[in-house]
Image (spheres, grey):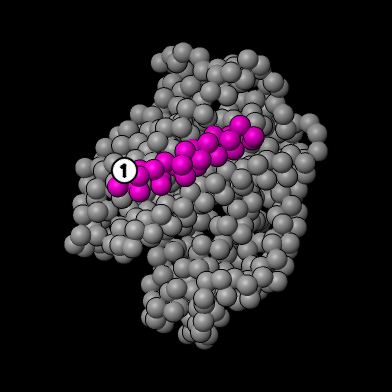
Amino acid sequence: MSEAPAKFVTGSLMRHVTVMSLTSSVGIMAVFLVDFIDMVFIAMLGKAELAAAIGYAGSILFFTTSFSIGMAIAVGALVARSLGAGDMAAARARSSHGLIYGVGFGSAFALFVWLNIPLFVGWIGAEGETATLAEGYLRIIVPSLPFLVVGMMGGGILRAHGDARRAMMATIYGGGVNAVLDPILIFGFGLDLTGAALASVAARVVIGVTALVPILRHHGGLPRADLAGMARDFVPLVTIGFPAILTQLATPVGQAIVTRSMAQYGLEAVAGMAIVGRLMPVSFAVIFALSGAVGPILGQNYGAGRGDRVRRGFNAALIFAGGVIVVIAAVLFGLRGVIVDLLDATGVTRDLVYLFCGPLALLFFFNAVLFVANAAFNNLGHPFYSTWMNWGRNTVAMVPLVWVCATLFGAPGVLIGQSLAGVVFGVIAWVLARRVIAQGGAAGPRDSFAREGRLLSLLNLRK
């Protein structure tokens, strides 16, 4: 095993941003591809209620995944900061403590969800046989949440070390296992939805194991935890993790607002929105990967006291995002006819796809600004700023803008309002992030992090 120094405190920041973002995006693409493969295989069974059950279950699983993402952001930020400060022992200890807390909290959260599955399925509108199928699917997958937490947190630790390739490979291995087992279990053994659920569980186990092995072999391992160290790391972990989880939950709330607004224009409009919803993460996987990819770069330099490199790393990420979005928007515009023909989109559905493949794709740059700003907030000691920005975008800005634009332009106005909400809070996040970076360079990691811990200090928790 090796103890490499902090990787991002030297060298080209643009190169670090590019490599981390591209490798992270491959892992994200693998996740989206696996979800798509699940839907394809279930659809091949020709039973609409099975596909609907996966759709309802997916809404609930998204909330459980948000927990994993929040914990991964927290442990990644803490490890990156320790590495940047040159404290390898603290980085290893925080990795162990974070994983223990993650498994403990993840198990408790999984138990809570599992015991209330019928209630949650009813809340999202599933009824009859579809509800029964969704409940059965969730009862198999939900207990595997601790494995997903380990996999996500392991990936966060690897990215904090600058090992984006191994973090990416863990996700790819899991996706490959899922893709192989799906047809075997669904068709070969005739397990239908149960087979799809078991394949997903196996994939989560693989992701968890393959994320831990590189940490043990190449990054100093995981030392035995001690109570004093775990008590010391509890507050910083929760201080970042809790708002990060809340931040992730803002997205489904915003999507619910958009879906409700679009529904009044009929099934064609809803279909167009669904197509755009699938095109977006596939087209902009690199941009969706920015927050997790840029975080370790900013965190290491912040921990090293390199405020100049934190500022330049933030700017490099925005320049990279702008270039990527211009290229992707141009490709989408050139292929818009092919896309609508492939999906047999007509009428309002076609109009919405054309709208996304044109000006709205360019406006996605402001979402990229928000992602990069969130990385700065999470790694520079202000994680609640990310929560405020995401919830502000998905509620305060989105509700009035969607309503006004829909009144003026009809169904296209719903997507326009959604994009303009991203513009408003992208600009706000950019201004706030620049302020945080300027202050962080002077305050230092300990002082900045202490400010954000005041909320938990009210509970008489000590660092």
Q: State the residue at coordinates (44%, 79%).
A: 268
Q: State the residue at coordinates (47%, 18%).
A: 229
Name the kind of residue labelled 1 in the image.
Phe
Q: Which residue is mark 1?
A: 189
In the image: residue 268, left or right of residue 302: left
Q: Is residue 9 above or below residue 412?
A: above
In the rendered structure, which segment of residues is drawn in magenta? Answer: 164-190
Most foreground residue, 138 or 177: 177
In the image: residue 333, left or right of residue 450: right
Q: Is residue 315 magenta?
A: no
Identify the image quadrant of residue 84.
top right
Q: State the residue at coordinates (35%, 48%).
A: 187
* Principal secondary structure, stretch drawn in magenta: helix
Q: Quadrant of the N terminus?
A: top right
Q: Is residue 180 magenta?
A: yes
State the residue lying farthest toward the bottom.
Answer: 408
Res 73 visible: no
In x, y percent, where is residue 289? 60, 48
